[in-house]
Image (cartoon, rainbow, N blue to C red):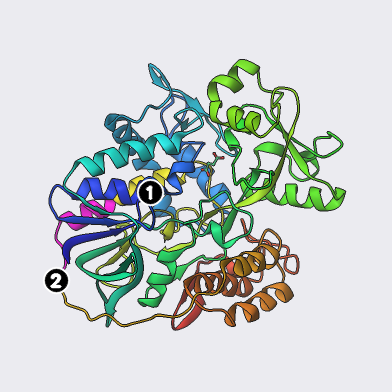
Amino acid sequence: MKTDILVIGGGIAGLSFALRVSKRASVTLVTKTEVMESNTRYAQGGLAGVFSENDDFALHVADTLKVGDGICNKEAVKVLVENAPDSITWLDSLGVAFDKNGSFHLGKEAVHSRRRIVHAGDSTGKSIQQVLVDRVTEGKITVLEQHDVVSILSEKGRCGGAVVVCDGERKIIHARATVLATGGIGNLYSRTCNPAIATGDGIALAYEAGATLMDMEFIQFHPTGLLHKGTNFLLTERLRGEGALLVNAQGERFMEHYHPEREMAARDIVARACFMEAQKTGADVYLDMTTIAKDVLEKEFPAITAKCTLLGYDVFSEPVPVSPTAHYLCGGVKIDLSGRTDVDGLYAIGEVSCSGAHGADRLASNSLVDGLVFSKRLAEHLEKGLLEPVEIEETLLDEESSSLSAIQALMWEHVGIVRNQQGLQYCLDELKKLTGRNATVAEMITRCALAREESRGTHYRSDFSTKIDLFRKHTLINKEGISFE
Ligand code: SIN
């Protein structure tokens, strides 16, 4: 099969990119399961954009840099922030039912110095996913669901499509441009709020094709995953923005012992504090939403109140148990500001990619806009012209994949919220005994975490607990090895 553009993955980045480029090129979009399933679908909080009169781009940039902890690519941050409002307005024009009262209702999340979170109740991602899927499937884009990409067709630094498997049948898709939009890696950890499909497939595919990965050690843990067996449900940061508090098993607030900004400190700080408080007290920590007026809680957080009620919690009268949970990969496949990787014809957008906009930790609600902004920039880049077609032969890479649960346990234990040399080295040695793309991605994360002998953003080393200027750099890893730049 031949197509101009092959898009791998159907979250906000892949879908919005496909919509934008399909006017001028043939587009095939493949998804590992059904097209409605993606990390985007589970996003609660929203999209950060400068809309209010007391806000400006410089403030949003400053907040993003603060959380990024010294290693953001400032140009990428500027691009992200300055293009966010237009991208959000574009989604609005497609019919996403954002909360409005004349203008957008703007929520607050940690470190944002202004209210700037555009949202659709507490199911923002679901509304976006539905609207984009409707638009994509009614157009002329070929959507292939249940198609798992097993390798990228690449040769001498040039990509020419991918090999997919559906119902055991192998198919080759030749493409002039191949776009990775496969999302993150949360499901490589035993505790995650990501769906099962988030196993970093695009990272492994890109690495195998010769691309460089960047800042892979920076895994963001969200502080408040609902701690309830069998669910990976998130309790959005916007709850803390509206006044919800973190308390220990004795009902005491504890964030003041960890950071002056308490519940509104950067996410890595709050996640670590929850982790450490639970260790110190030997008991769970809780999110107390009773501080939010009942009508606000019901009106603004209907999915959360419904889910908690279903699971037996009365959020109006008691705190609910929470735990940090693997949430977002700040690193990924290294891209330039147009979405190009260092393999010709291979591009990346959304969570799988890394422009450096998020540095060592990501500001809340900057991820959906990242998917929108960089997919638009890639669409504009490709509209100027596609590379000439190439016919690249398939190289077979069939190997048995090791059990995901073994990898999840290793990663949670040794490459989680608090890391050290001994645990990282043990994990790496164990991962080397395993095979398959999940093991490859886990190994990349672990190698980068081992090499960064400092603590910065989401990467905390108990054996190197401070920030070191020497490491104020990006971590780069590819088949040739690892370096800092
Ligand atoms: C949340 O709703 O707390 C998550 C938002 C985000 O990760 O940007």
Segment colored magenta: 377-388
Q: Establish if 406 lies above or below 297.
A: below
Q: Is mark 1 within 8 Å of ligand 1?
A: no
Residue 395, picture quadrant: bottom left
Q: Amino acid at mark 1?
A: Gly
Q: Residues within 10 Å of mark 2 (few under 14, many from 20)?
A: some
Quadrant of the image containing the N terminus: bottom left
Residue drawn 47% across and 67% down? 214
Estimate the x, y position of residue 260 in percent, counting from the top left: 73, 40
How far apart are the alpha carbons under marks 1 and 2?
Answer: 27 Å
Q: Nearer the viewer, residue 111 or 191?
A: 191
Residue 242 seen in the current view: yes
Q: Residues within 10 Å of mark 1 (few under 14, many from 20)?
A: many
Residue 485 seen in the current view: no
Estimate the x, y position of residue 404 in percent, counting from the top left: 56, 67
Q: Establish if 103 lies above or below 343.
A: above
Q: Is residue 386 magenta?
A: yes
For marks 1 and 2, the one nearer the N-term is 1
Estimate the x, y position of residue 204 in percent, counting from the top left: 43, 71
Q: Ligand 1 is found in which quarter of the picture?
A: top right
* Label 1: element kind: loop
Left or right: 35, with 234 as reference point: left
Residue drawn 15% across and 57% down? 384
Residue designated by label 2: 389
Residue drawn 30% across and 47% down? 15
Numbered tag placed on residue 11 in the rendering:
1
Q: Residue furthest front?
A: 167
Estimate the x, y position of residue 259 in percent, counting from the top left: 74, 44
Q: Is residue 402 magenta?
A: no
Residue drawn 49% across and 53% down? 358
Q: Amino acid at mark 2?
A: Pro
Q: Establish if 304 lies above or below 294.
A: below
